[in-house]
Amino acid sequence: MFRSARRLFLRSIVAASLAVSGAAWSQSGKTVKIIVGFPAGGGTDAIARTLADKLKDELGAPVIVENKPGAGGQLAAHALKSAAPDGTTFFISHDHTITILPLVVKNPGFDPAKDFVPVAGFASFVNAFALSSGTPAKSLDEYVAWIRNQGQGKGVVGVPAPASTPEFLVKVLGDTFKLDLVPAPYRGSAPMIGDMLGNQIAAGIGSVPDFIENHKGGRIRVVAVLGGKRQPTLPEVPTLAELGIGGFEDLPYYGFFAPAGTPKAAIDHFSQALSKVVAMPDVRERLTALGLAVEFMPQQQLANRERAYAKTWTEIIRKSGFQPQ
């Protein structure tokens, strides 16, 4: 009885301490910065601004979004690494920067395991294959036939970053359909989509959040999605697995990361605020409309998700024969 009561007492003390430290953090009044590794106007930027607008109230501090595009988020990762670990700087990232870049770049200039600490995740999403409106094809099979007839089997497919999962998917599609498909890397999804809207490039691979608004507006046609099932926002679009191309069912994630050494009280405070924000009906509706499957992931769950995803893509990249550049 005594030991049980003592454990309960100690737990209450710890809980009270965390609550006090979290409250103290929220009263600091310091501006919180969310770094985005892609240009303004892209899917990640839209997601960051949606969350920032609500986080400011939950954190009790101003929240700004700072875009640092370039090298598939590598410049943003460098900015996070050099930021003071004082609980005011966070990096919103999907799988590419945190998981894929360290697998495909010899010296990325950062080590996620040493330089960053996961804070919390909030969603998963799928990548998609899309066509510009100037492309006559209405499906992936029609695109393949069109490339064979018009391009003698050669085609260019835009990807939002070099050595990204979309770039590896271009190779898989080329091998599957025996086409000479060449990836055209961009500095983010926004410039890639700009060229697709201008019919400068016939096809592109990116996340559903990147394509969803233009697809619904009829300016871009999403013709296939990755993942194990069709997306609620795109129920008419088949999965690659349905089209006979398996192995891409493990979904990418979105999460927040902080510089290594950031106090646990700050991480807990931000995580708690994020969990409240993503539970808000209007935020969930907005993120779902952007093509995300909203799913709050506390710190350890995000860390586990990142490790599992890295394991999957380590094997895919190895099989592709790609050598880190």
Image: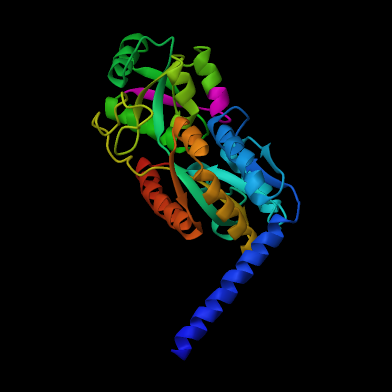
Query: Residue 177: x percent and y percent?
Result: 28, 25
Q: In this view of the protein, which residue sits in the foreground, 16 or 135?
A: 16
Query: Residue 218: x percent and y percent?
Result: 43, 14
Q: Is residue 118 above or below residue 1?
A: above
Which residue: 45% across, 34% down? Answer: 288
Q: What range is drawn magenta here?
A: 179-192
Q: Is residue 80 above or below residue 70?
A: below
59 inside magenta stretch:
no
Query: Residue 149: x percent and y percent?
Result: 31, 10
Q: In this view of the protein, which residue sits in the foreground, 10 or 149?
A: 10
Horizontal side of 277 relative to 321 (left or right) equals right
Which residue: 63% across, 63% down? Answer: 265
User: Does residue 218 appear anywhere in the picture?
Assistant: yes
Residue 150, by quadrant, is top left
Which residue: 33% across, 39% down? Answer: 248
| Quadrant containing the N terminus in the rendered view | bottom left
Q: In this view of the protein, which residue sits in the foreground, 288 or 75?
A: 288
Query: Residue 128: x percent and y percent?
Result: 40, 29
Instruction: State the residue lying farthest toward the right.
Output: 29
User: Does residue 36 appear anywhere in the picture?
Assistant: no
